[in-house]
Each structure stands twice: as structure tokens, then as C-alpha cells.
Image (spheres, rainbow, N blue to C red):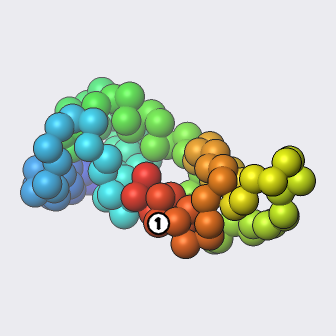
Amino acid sequence: MRRDGIAEEARGLREVVSRLERTAKTTPVPSGVRAQIVAFAARAREGGWSLPMVARAVGVSVGSVRNWRREPPVTALVPVVVTPSRVGKRAGLTVVAPSGYRVEGLDLSTTAALLRALE
């Protein structure tokens, strides 16, 4: 990819990022956009761009680009094992999500709704 092609791609990604309805800098960037930025970063780095140049060009922080490059892509569902609680007479499930959230004592539908809301 020519250098001007990298710059053009960066402008396109910056436009995508600017159209996101982000209410704060900490509002998550959708995974599809993150994947595009990571792929762009790899091509730009081959073209001699530094990570700060990439981040500035697309309108996100350098730390975000670094983190997204390290994240393994989520490509499949994670198997879940549901076992009854043996502690006292507590009702409900104990679920540990791949992201690290631990939910205890809720029924299945409430747990699922909570984990969806946390994503």
C-alpha cells in the first residue's frame, strides 16, 4: 500500500470513529471498528508509521491501539458449565464470564440480562 493510501485509509477510519456516538473518551469502541483499526495499524506500521502516529491519525488513544492489538479476537462462544450450588440453601447460579465478572445467586434469565448489560 502506498503512503498516500495509508493516509487516505486513516482519514476514513477517523471519520468512522468521529461518527460513533461516544459520550466520553471511555465509551467503548465497537469490536468491528477496533478490528479495522488493528488491521490498519499493522499495515501502517509496515509503512513506517509509529503507534502514536496511527492513534493520532484515527482519533483514538495510543493505549487503546496497544490494548486492542494484544486482545485475542473473540471468534466463538465460550462453553459454560452450570452446576448446582452446594453452599447452604442459596438459590441461583454462580457464573464467571470470560471478561472476569462473577455473578452469584441469580436465576439464569436475570444473569444473562445482567451480563448483556455489562458488555
Residue 91 location (% of width, % of height): 72, 59
Q: Nearer the viewer, residue 119 or 49?
A: 119
Residue 32 location (% of width, % of height): 36, 63
Relative to residue 46, is residue 89 drawn left or right?
right
Dot 1, how many residues are within 10 Å of its Cα: few (below 14), some (14-19), or many (20+)?
few
Quadrant in the rendering for residue 15: bottom left
The residue wearing badge 1 is 113
Residue visible at 81% across and 54% down? 89
What's the residue type where badge 1 is placed? Ala
Residue 70 location (% of width, % of height): 55, 40
Q: Nearer the viewer, residue 57 or 19?
A: 19
Residue visible at 86% across and 47% down? 87
Find the residue positioned furthest to the front. Answer: 89
Relative to residue 80, is residue 107 drawn left or right?
left
Quarter in which the C terminus is drawn: bottom left
Relative to residue 108, is residue 1 drawn left or right?
left
Relative to residue 31, is residue 75 drawn left or right?
right
Find the residue positioned furthest to the right. Answer: 86
Residue 103 location (% of width, % of height): 62, 50
